[in-house]
Amino acid sequence: MLYKSSMKSLKMVMANLITMFLLIEVIACGFGFGFGADGGLNMNYYLMSCPFVEPVVKNVVNRALDNDPTLAAALIRMHFHDCFIQGCDGSVLIDSTKDNTAEKDSPANLSLRGFGIIDDIKEELERQCPGVVSCADILAMAATEAVFYAGGPVYNIPKGRKDGRRSKIEDTINLPFPTFNASELIRQFGQHGFSVQEMVALSGAHTLGVARCASFKNRLSQVDPALDSDFAKTLSKTCSSGDNSEQPFDETRNDFDNVYFNALLRKNGVLFSDQTLYTSPRTRNFVNAYAMNQALFFLDFQQAMVKMGLLDIKQGSNGEVRQNCRVIN
């Protein structure tokens, strides 16, 4: 136990140092992610206004994941689906109304889970420091805690995002499709400023969680040379229970590791958009590198996640701090 505790502390120290250097690089390169003296994002944004925000997020997330470890994948996926639509502004959390169908009711988002965790965090923070912590920041922090809980890298993120006031179903057309090939993935991630390597690293989030049959059954209607024949039988058996039946992305569905990339080497990618990363010469070398070196994957993943958390953030009058994460003020 002492050894594990020491290793966890060492991971935290190293990850925080890496994150600090990454942020210095981001600022120096002028990515335009909203840093600056105008009340922009920073690591200690809530130091004076809500000093216990991070322990609250960690405790609520850990308690939920102790009860259901599969929610780690759900929180990371929710953060991704939030950031890729209108930026990291908590818009994915908003409920639909009679006058508006929100993002969460899009077919691409109907399988999202974990909203109750965000609600629980918000409720506790509203008791401690009402009207201070945004739902966008809560979701971003919850995702980082989920990664670490599942055994992945620990990393810190800057805070200070404001919540958006728009959530519309039509905007979700900009989410990647499970049928995308490598070129389509590269183009779509590139529109958000990600390199090919960063796209592959972020795809490694599929080291956690499952895919539903409806998202991969099209691969089974004919012989797919990129799909191992025995694994195709496994997928067919899964789909025999219906479109909502679930297939883990890899053999360790609740552990954050590099097993996902090793599965791609064996043609055991569940989604077409997974296996294409190994099929395509433009991305294959990154898959090979992460399959061989888990530490490299962890490093690149945490850097890409910090960068993703800075996409199109709302600040000042462009956003708000919702009292209820499901409802615009």
Image (spheres, helix red, strand yellow):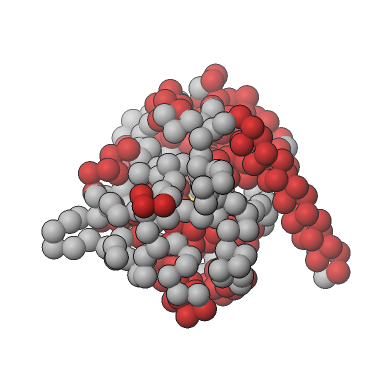
Outermost residue, bottom side: 127
325 relative to 201 in the view: left or right:
left
Outermost residue, front side: 37
Q: Residue at 36% across / 34% down in the picture?
A: 179
Question: Which is nearer the eye, 275 or 187?
Answer: 187
Residue 256 drawn at (x, y percent) = 62, 52
Outermost residue, top side: 281
Q: Residue at 38% across / 37% down in the picture?
A: 176
Number of disc labels:
0
Residue 143 drawn at (x, y percent) = 53, 57
Question: Which is nearer the eye, 267 or 80?
Answer: 80
Q: Residue at 50% across / 75% down in the picture?
A: 129
Residue 305 visible in the snapshot: no
Residue 283 visible in the snapshot: yes
Q: Residue at 51% across / 25% down in the picture?
A: 279
- Above or below residue 78? Residue 61 is below
Residue 251 drawn at (x, y percent) = 58, 51
Quadrant the C terminus occupies: bottom left
Quadrant the N terminus occupies: bottom right
- Above or below residue 25? Residue 105 is below
215 relative to 282 in the view: left or right:
left
Residue 328 drawn at (x, y percent) = 29, 62
Rendering quarter of residue 233: top left
15 relative to 35 in the view: left or right:
right
Question: Which is nearer the eye, 83 or 300?
Answer: 83
